[in-house]
Amino acid sequence: MKFSIWLFIALTIFVILDSVDVEVDVDDTTWLERKTDRLIHVYEYDPNIGVRYRYAGDDFDKYMRLIDLLIKFKYG
């Protein structure tokens, strides 16, 4: 009996999480690196590639995962 209730709760949570669609819009935003306060400009986010960004003063683009942007940088 207890197992079936936990299974029902787990399946319900899975269905809810699977149906939620989160849209991320970080295109053309400015972020600060947490450790050094270096400024970066995020040009675009593509879920398949990641975040395309450039440090202030640099002439070339770099790429990182979205989770790295959220952990290592702060919006502002």
Image (spheres, grey):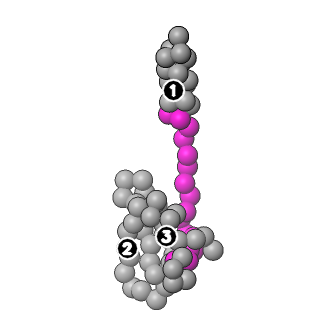
Structural crowding at the residue carrying mark 2, measured as other residues with C-alpha within 10 Å and reported as few (<14), some (14–19) or many (≥20): few
Asked whether disc 3 touches disc 1, contact meaning CB atoms under 8 Å apart, the reply is no
Q: How far is mark 3 from mark 2, CA to CA?
A: 15 Å
Nearer mark to the viewer, of 3 and 1: 1
- Which disc is residue 72 wearing? 3
Q: How far is mark 1 from mark 2, CA to CA?
A: 39 Å
Sequence-earlier tag: 3 or 2: 2
Quarter in which the C terminus is drawn:
bottom right
Foreground residue, 41 or 35?
A: 35
Residue at 60% in and 70% down: 75
Which residue was labeled with disc 2? 62
Q: How far is mark 3 from mark 1, CA to CA?
A: 32 Å
Q: Which amino acid is tagged 2?
A: Lys
Residue at 51% in and 80% down: 35
Give the percent coordinates (x, y) of residue 74: 58, 71
Nearer mark to the viewer, of 1 and 2: 1
Asked which secondary structure carries label 1, the reply is helix
Q: Which amino acid is tagged 1?
A: Ala
Residue 48 relative to residue 74: left or right: left
Q: Which amino acid is tagged 3?
A: Lys
- Residue lying farthest to the top in this orientation: 1
Q: Which residues are magenta?
A: 17-33
Asked which secondary structure carries label 3, the reply is helix
